[in-house]
């Protein structure tokens, strides 16, 4: 290695960013070359100087306080549950919405870039389902009725599980159209009778 | 995650790096008042976009926001401050310099070093701060400043030459 080759390696060497093969070659050169060795010493001494605590500006205490006061205070944050008046319909439809979303994640492989568009579609589809007569195409609490209903209407077989034992009874299903294909939406009542 | 958890997590993972945020803002903006403005705005922006921090280095993430906030601030408040491309010729760095034993900057007083750093063009200054004061790797700096690694290396090498030149000129032997 000559000085021309060694020169550009001196900074990365001082920074610990040189790979081991190059380190060996450079160190051999440095042993025999006082000019390059001097360049290295100058870089090292400059590095030590710049690391000095005296050059580091710590944040003023007032700044930290001001930022904290601008952040939302925890006391203002109200849990969602207290805000929403949950009734049977919203609960039921949220359940349908959640299942619809879960199914989609299972059956469609979506690229991250289209995620937002898909989310928008799910929301639109859900809102449409809230209009009278759109919640269910097939009304049945029997998974063995709901699942076969989708036969021939979809290019896949949706998993239909009865979660009645977990207090989330199935009440029916419908066809939705999302992400350029037909999908199954299952309607599940997600509320507890107290 | 509810709002309370989000706030707690933010205070635990991001706010401990406020010193680094202020230090970078201070070196970029050049004075305390503007640096506080930039650091505060960046921190609040960081909270707003806290969801985009995923497992990566929180300090690097915060400093990326500080840097972007600073450049937005710069365009708005000091539109005349030009970011100039600098090459070895405009720097007036001759190769002969490397042959001289630079005055050990450790003997230079902190004020002289501060002035020398402050006089660096801003895109050189930020690389020096990120490398020497924050200890980021070339790769991390490249990601943070959105430039290729080769540019990080050449800016760092040039910044060091400039600093050495300044400190050598300011402190001739016999001044001590």
Image (spheres, helix red, strand yellow):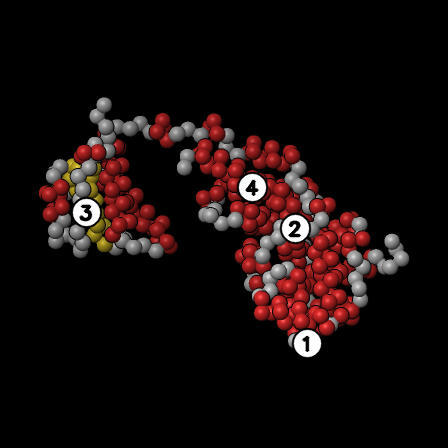
Residue that numbered label 1 is attached to: A2
Q: Nearer the viewer, mark 2 or mark 1?
A: 1
Q: Earlier in the sequence, mark 2 or mark 4?
A: 4
Left or right, A7 with respect to A97, comes to right
Marks 3 and 2: same chain?
no
B174 vs A194, left or right, is right
Q: Please give the chain letter of the residue carrying mark 4.
A: B
Judge whether A152 appears above or below B93 on screen.
above
Q: In x, y percent, where is residue B124? A: 66, 58
Q: Residue furthest bottom?
A: A2
| C-alpha distance separating marks 2 and 1 | 32 Å
Q: Residues within 10 Å of mark 3 (few under 14, many from 20)?
A: few
Of tags 4 and 3, the one toward the viewer is 3
**Which of pointers 2 and 4 indicates the residue nearer the eye?**
2
- Foreground of the two, B27 or A14: A14
Q: Secondary structure at mark 2?
A: helix
Q: Are marks 2 and 4 in contact (CB under 8 Å)?
A: no
- Closer to the camera, B55 or B122? B55
Circle 3 sits on which residue? Answer: A159
Q: Is residue A136 visible?
A: no
Question: Is residue B147 something one can see in this rendering?
Answer: yes
Q: Please give the name of the residue rendered at 65% of the width and 50% of the height, measured from the top-left corner.
A: B133
Q: Are marks 4 and 3 in contact (CB under 8 Å)?
A: no
Residue B133, disc: 2
Task: Determine whether the residue tagged by mark 1 lies in a helix, strand or loop.
Answer: loop
| Dots 2 and 1 on the same chain | no
In x, y percent, where is residue B64? 55, 50
Assign the N terminus of chain B to one quadrant of the image. Answer: top left
CB under 8 Å between callouts 4 and 1? no
């Amino acid at each position: 290695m000559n000085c021309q080759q060694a020169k550009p390696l001196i900074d990365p060497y001082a920074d610990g960013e040189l790979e081991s093969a190059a380190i060996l070659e450079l160190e051999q050169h440095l042993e025999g070359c006082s000019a390059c060795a001097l360049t290295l010493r100058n870089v090292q001494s400059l590095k030590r100087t710049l690391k000095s605590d005296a050059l580091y500006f710590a944040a003023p205490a007032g700044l930290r306080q001001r930022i904290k006061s601008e952040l939302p205070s925890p006391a203002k944050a109200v849990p969602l549950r207290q805000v929403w008046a949950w009734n049977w319909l919203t609960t039921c439809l949220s359940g349908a919405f959640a299942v619809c979303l879960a199914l989609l994640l299972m059956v469609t492989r979506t690229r991250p870039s289209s995620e937002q568009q898909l989310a928008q579609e799910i929301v639109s589809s859900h809102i449409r389902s809230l209009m009278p007569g759109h919640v269910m195409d097939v009304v049945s609490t029997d998974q063995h009725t709901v699942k076969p209903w989708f036969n021939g209407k979809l290019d896949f077989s949706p998993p239909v599980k009865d979660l009645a034992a977990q207090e989330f009874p199935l009440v029916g299903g419908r066809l939705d159209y999302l992400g350029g294909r037909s999908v199954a939406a299952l309607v599940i009542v997600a509320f507890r009778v107290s | 995650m509810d709002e309370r958890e989000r706030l707690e997590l933010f205070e635990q993972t991001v706010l401990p790096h406020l010193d680094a945020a202020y230090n970078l803002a201070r070196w970029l903006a050049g004075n305390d008042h503007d640096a506080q403005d930039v650091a505060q705005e960046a921190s609040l922006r960081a909270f707003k976009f806290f969801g985009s921090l995923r497992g990566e280095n929180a300090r690097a993430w915060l400093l990326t926001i500080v840097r972007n906030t600073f450049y937005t601030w710069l365009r708005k408040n000091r539109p005349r401050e030009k970011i100039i491309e600098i090459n070895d010729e405009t720097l007036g760095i001759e190769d002969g310099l490397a042959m001289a034993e630079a005055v050990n900057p450790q003997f230079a007083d902190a004020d002289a070093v501060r002035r020398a750093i402050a006089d660096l063009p801003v895109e050189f200054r930020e690389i020096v701060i990120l490398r020497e004061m924050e200890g980021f790797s070339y790769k991390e700096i490249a990601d943070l400043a959105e430039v290729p690694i080769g540019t990080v290396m050449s800016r760092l090498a040039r910044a060091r030459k400039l600093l050495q030149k300044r400190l050598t000129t300011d402190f001739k032997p016999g001044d001590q």
